Amino acid sequence: MNTNIPKTKPSEPSPATKKSKRSNENLTGWLFASPWVIGLLLFFAYPLLSSVYYSFTDYSIFQAGEFIGLANYRELMTDELFWISIWNTVYFAVFFVPLSIIFGVALAMILNMKIKGMAVYRTIFFLPTLVPHVALAILWIWLLNPEFGLINNALNLIGIQGPPWLGSLFWAKPSLILMSLWGIGQAVIIYLAGLSDISEEYYEAADVDGASFLQKTFKITIPLLTPVIFFNLVMGFIGAFQQFTLPYTMTNGSGSPADALTFYVMYLYDNAFNYFRMGYASAMAWILFFIIMSLTAFVFWSSKRWVHYQG
């Protein structure tokens, strides 16, 4: 008896059924994503587009404001404090960012050495990044006090008269750079991750060729670490141009002495929340946006010449 029963193929769903199923899946996906989409539109897209419009008005918190065209931008071009704030911010960025890279890479190479208890040392150097900026500012105000500060007392022990630091036009910005360098532990962690990604085979081959420590550093370590340096360079410039908490806390918002510590974002904040010139502050915000975007684009363009990726 023949028991072979022919098998029937399951019927395929019709195109209309497939389209309906796909539509239901898309609807379900949008429903799950809707909280994020609503938050993006409500708390990011709307304020962003609104600030573009407000930058062309004399809007304040107390009145809707009228459209005044480019008046805010023209006034900024003749605002002396605006240019002072730009100079202070550029000064800080030009010195802090390269120094943070140099000290960060050097410190990461030291902390990458295979010695006993290195995990403890890494933790110690990372701890300053966990200190809130307000507490950090108060701590450094005490350390840099020209009369009873620990730094000037230490300098007096070796016969050096310490400067007035935050009370001096010359030393105010270098003091802020010094404080900021104290908290580069986060960048050091990123450099350490980059160093751990460099294969030991390169150093073994260099040892066979008789390369010195400096040769291995500048021919192997630095070139292969350039992708990480590139990342920290971009983030460093963005952070430097947004410097706010430390100078604002140390000077109580005054930017003293003689506006030497009045940074761009501080002046923007004053216009928005102290003088209630929201339209003027919006214009400043967009100028800052274009400065940062231009600088970032230049760094990306130049990276083709000096950033080397493994493989």
Image (cartoon, grey):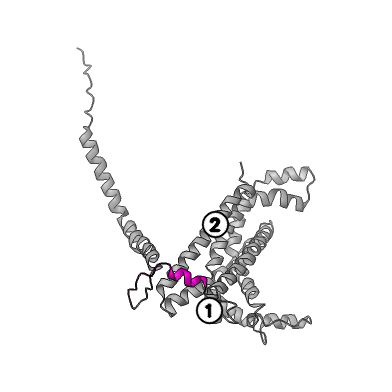
Indicate which disc residue 296 carries: 2
Q: Residue furthest top?
A: 1
Q: What residue is pinned by disc 1?
A: 249
Residue positioned 62% across, 63% down in the render? 97
Question: Foreground residue, 309 or 268?
Answer: 268
Give x and y (percent) for residue 128: 58, 70
Indicate which disc residue 111 carries: none
Q: Secondary structure at mark 1?
A: helix
User: As shown in the figure, which amino acid type bears the numbered disc 1?
Assistant: Thr
Q: Is residue 305 left or right of residue 246?
A: right
Q: Quadrant of the C terminus?
A: top right
Q: Quadrant of the N terminus?
A: top left
Give x and y (percent) for residue 71: 43, 70
- Dot in front, 2 or 1: 2
Residue positioned 64% across, 49% down in the render? 306
Q: Is residue 200 left or right of residue 253?
A: right
Q: In this picture, is 92 found above or below 137?
A: above
Residue span colored magenta: 63-78
Q: Secondary structure at mark 2?
A: helix
Tally of marks: 2
Residue positioned 29% across, 51% down in the render? 30
Give x and y (percent) for residue 299: 58, 54
Residue positioned 43% across, 67% down in the render? 70
